[in-house]
Image (cartoon, rainbow, N blue to C red):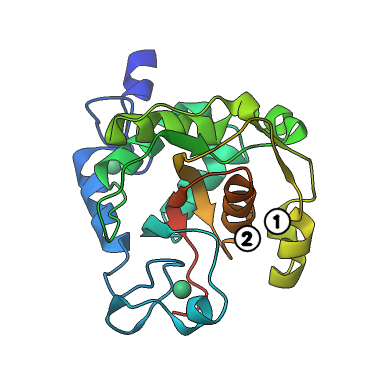
Amino acid sequence: MHHLFHSACPLCHGRSAKHGLCRDCLQDFSALQLSKEHCPLCKEPSIHGNICGACIQKPPPIDAFDASFRYEEPLRLLLTRWKNQGLMQLSSAITELLTAYPAKFRQPEKFDYIVPMPVSRLRLIEHGFHHTLLLAEAASHVFNVPVLPTAAIVRQHRPPQSSLSSKERKNNLRHAFTIQQAMTSLRLLIIDDVSTTGSSINELAGSLKKAGAARVCAWTLAKTLLHD
Ligand SMILES: [Zn+2]
Ligand SMILES: [Zn+2]
């Protein structure tokens, strides 16, 4: 019975080969993929997939951004259970999704390190596990690039971004990241689960650039579309 529970797909409870999603559910996620007609810097819809007006007006510190899916059901439910309810047994289903639908950047990218979105100490205790580190380890296999040690960046604890307006989000994160080592000439790929306004990714990318990084790209499993 115990074994049966662990090999059940967390979405449909059908049989899955590993501790992850069944083949049908994994395939269903292709419907949540973002089309090519999106800005390569913020992934919001744009004409012919060109850089959007907002990014031309105020270029973000990020060099390229991709998200595998729109942040909609059933992904939202899966991520909420995983992160907020601390259901670590969903990790394999989630990392499987990440590796099955890898980031596709406009131009070929080479990276020196994968950077898991830093998590504050308090949040780490709340969640019970380092969720973005698990994503980074999966991404590390996709790109065949090592994960930057988490001690390299310290994140101060701030109120959760999800509790704030888009304007408050930017101020909330100002100077939230302390880069503990030189990033001179490094090409980095930030990994996170969800991007809403892109504030945390852009704040981190800016801090990494200030520490010397040559190129900073980002990949998230999901993205909330602000303009659909
Ligand atoms: Zn299933
Ligand atoms: Zn844009």
Q: Who's the residue at 76% across and 56% down the image?
A: 174
- Can I make out residue 1 in this image? no
Mark 2 near ligand 2 (CB under 8 Å)?
A: no
Measured along the vertical axis of the image, is residue 19 above or below residue 153? above
Q: How many marks?
A: 2
Depth check, front residue: 132 or 84: 132
Q: Who's the residue at 26% across and 58% down the image?
A: 107
Residue type at the position of mark 1: Gln
Circle 1 — which element? Answer: helix
Q: Who's the residue at 63% across and 49% down the image?
A: 210
Of the numbered discs 2 and 1, the one sitting upstream in the chain is 1
**Picture disc at residue 198:** none
Q: Is residue 158 left or right of residue 128?
A: right
Residue 86 coordinates in the image, percent (x, y): 60, 32
Classify residue 45 by image quadrant: bottom left
Circle 2 — which element? Answer: helix
Residue 204 coordinates in the image, percent (x, y): 61, 49
Report the residue marked by disc 1. 161
Q: Who's the residue at 37% across and 22% down the image?
A: 6
Q: Quadrant of ligand 1?
A: top left
Q: Are marks 2 and 1 in contact (CB under 8 Å)?
A: yes
Q: Is residue 145 left or right of residue 83?
A: left
Residue 24 coordinates in the image, percent (x, y): 20, 46
Residue type at the position of mark 2: Ser
- Can I make out residue 152 in this image? yes
Check the picture and name the quadrant holding the C terminus.
bottom left
Measured along the vertical axis of the image, is residue 58 above or below residue 169? below
**Picture disc at residue 199:** 2
